[in-house]
Amino acid sequence: MIYDLIIAGAGPAGLSAGIYAGRYMLKTLIIEKAQDGGQISQTAEIENYPGLRTDMEESGLTLTERMTEQVKRFGAERALDEIVSYELDGDIKRLTGLSGKVYEARAVILAMGAHYRSIGCKNEDRFRGMGISFCATCDANFFRGLEVYVVGGGDSALEEAMYLTKFARKVTVIHRRDELRAARSIQEKAFANDKLHFIWDSVVDEACGEDVLNAIVIKNVKTGELTRLEADKADGMMGLFGFLGMIPNTEKLEGTGLELENGYIKADESTRTNLGGVFAAGDIRTKELRQVVTACADGAVAAFQAERYLADKA
Ligand code: NAP
């Protein structure tokens, strides 16, 4: 069976592409290796996606469930498999799964997303969503009036730290060196911000607390000294945001002829890549704002572009 379209990944970008591909009556297969939703399947609360339900607690999972149901109504087929190799340069694209199955289509939308580089401290997984976050736009509001720590020294860490100062009482950037990686112009703005503080030459060694994060242990990488930083008693909790760079899930795309930039698939708002019939949607492509709403928009655009490509080829 040769599909019109294969969508790799069932996060918000892939699922949105599935809805649009269904509306365009394309014979579509969506391949996902784990549960639907990608990064948002681990997001406890989402409040910045338009049209969210307020009569129930909306999590990444509940939002994804409704997206998955919606895709089903538009008839895309599903496969649970991990793609281990891609052949993308011919008229027929071939994707091989870990199961050994070979999936074929005339067009492909790559929507496998990206993952955040973890902080690498003890108990990180335990406090993810309970004080530890990797998205200020998503979670800043939960830390109103509290003390927040930010790990990283790049553009993202500083920009997000400055954004967090609008919500948090005090924001402290913890960086592993004594010099920031961020652009000079961003550094200047950050140093001029009264609510922003810096701890140099340090990494987070441990996250602590009962149910929520209420202390961290940091380690000075030059002296090895450990320091425990506790949340104010009245606050009862603190925030720890990691901005140590993102890792796009493009490892298996190297050597396929697809153009990458800093690991991301090079594609603009049209989602078109350098290879005919291959489109990139969501966090996996070069873009500035990686959010559910922009991933969904990409999915719609990619399906539209795929339909156009297939019509031109017919
Ligand atoms: P990044 O530039 O790769 O910076 C990652 C930061 O995390 C670095 O300071 C790095 O420290 C630190 N880090 C990495 N691994 C670590 C570890 N294991 N432990 C402790 N610290 C660690 O990532 P980014 O800030 O997300 O930016 C990604 C790209 O997007 C960059 O090209 C950036 O310029 C761009 N960007 C641009 C803007 C803008 O122009 N407005 C905004 C955001 C992002 P070291 O410095 O010691 O390596």
Image: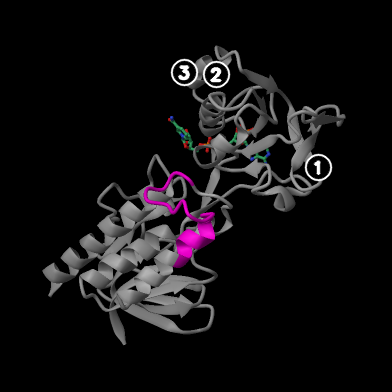
Q: Position of residue 184 (x, y in %)?
A: 50, 19
Quadrant of the picture in which ligand 1 is shown: top right
**Marks 3 and 1, Cα distance to the nearest angstrom?**
35 Å
Q: Nearer the viewer, residue 245 or 46?
A: 46
**Residue behind mark 2:** 190
Q: Nearer the viewer, residue 213 or 58?
A: 58
Numbered disc 2: secondary structure: helix
Query: Total label count?
Result: 3
**What amino acid type is highlighted by mark number 1?**
Cys
**What amino acid type is highlighted by mark number 2?**
Ala
Q: Which residue sits furthest bottom?
A: 1
Q: Earlier in the sequence, mark 3 or mark 1?
A: 3
Q: Is residue 244 visible?
A: yes
Left or right of 220 on screen, residue 47:
left
Q: Nearer the viewer, residue 289 or 254?
A: 289
Q: Earlier in the sequence, mark 2 or mark 1?
A: 2
Magenta span of residues = 47-65
**Residue behind mark 1:** 208
Which residue is drawn at the image coordinates 79% and 40% (left, top)?
A: 205
Q: Quadrant of residue 235?
A: top right
Numbered disc 3: secondary structure: helix
**What amino acid type is highlighted by mark number 3?**
Ser
**Marks 2 and 1, Cα distance to the nearest angstrom?**
28 Å
Q: Position of residue 70 (x, y in %)?
A: 36, 69
Location of the N terminus (image quadrant): bottom left
Q: Is residue 251 visible?
A: no
Left or right of 55 on screen, residue 233:
right
Does 103 sit above or below residue 158?
below
